[in-house]
Amino acid sequence: VGQPVAAVAAPTAEQAHRAAGRVQVDYEPLPAVIGTGEARRPGAPQLYPTTEARDGAPAYGEAPTPPAPWSGNVRGPGVVSRRGATAVDRLRRAHRNEDPLLVAQEYTTAAQVHSALEPHAALARWEQDGSLSLEVSTQTVRKVVTKAAAHWGLAPGQVHVRAAHVGGGFGAKQGLTTDVVAAGELARVAGAAVQVRLSRSEELIDGGHRPG
């Protein structure tokens, strides 16, 4: 539970923790929906009411999310298939006809936390020529280059990413993760190299997970 809202940098970790403790955030309370049953109720508050909000809604895992329609707070059905629409039509027809060969069942699992031995970590440094150097624990070097270039308005050739080793990732260390964004932004403001490394508790909050 939780989302990153701010980042601070300091010469030492102790100073950074003290500075982070002095950050004050003003929140606007919004209607909450707890649980799938409440989310499906008629008149339930819409968590993602616009197309832009739905495009940014969290996915169920690290794999690409298949396209699917929205109905209120419910997204789906989604089908990973070359002929997805045909598959959905056949399933709906079988349901209407009470086809004895159709088996429908709902399964749930507990949330899975990636919790790699090595936490998310990034070291960012802006060079004198305006390029960005990143040392990152990542599974996808090329994706980091592409997304970092788009985020900071750079050409891909201006982003240099180095990933010597990865101490586990399991799909959670892909693309422009929050540690990379925080390191890059803070390094630009400070005019110095900045390292961001998630603690174990932060890894459990923002290190990636698969909802149950």
Image (cartoon, grey):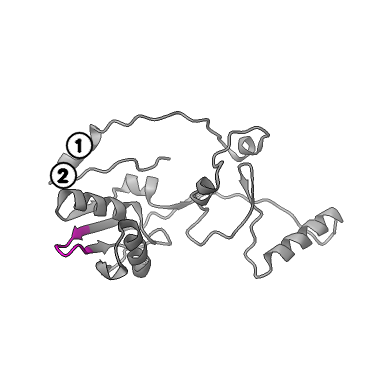
Tag 2 residue: 10
Q: Secondary structure at mark 1?
A: helix
Would you place residue 101 above or below residue 37 in this image? Answer: below
Label whose residue precedes the other's in the sequence (1 or 2): 2
Relative image position of residue 5 (x, y in whole percent): 34, 40
Q: Quadrant of residue 154?
A: bottom left
Please report the residue visible at 78 percent of the width from the left and 56 percent of the height from the top.
Answer: 92
Relative image position of residue 159 (x, y in whole percent): 27, 66
Q: Secondary structure at mark 2?
A: loop
Which residue occupies the foreground of this view, 55 or 80?
55
Is 92 displayed left or right of 7 in the figure?
right
Q: Which residues are magenta?
A: 124-132
Would you place residue 105 above or below residue 86 in this image? Answer: above
Please report the residue visible at 55 percent of the width from the left and 44 percent of the height from the top.
Answer: 50
Q: Amino acid at mark 1?
A: Ala
Tag 1 residue: 19
Please report the residue visible at 65 percent of the width from the left and 61 percent of the height from the top.
Answer: 79
Can residue 119 be seen at all in this image of the molecule? no
Q: Amino acid at mark 2?
A: Ala
Residue at the extreme right of the image, as rendered: 97
Please say if the residues under marks 1 and 2 sit with CB atoms less than 8 Å apart. Answer: yes
Relative image position of residue 65 (x, y in whole percent): 54, 59
Can residue 62 be seen at all in this image of the molecule? yes
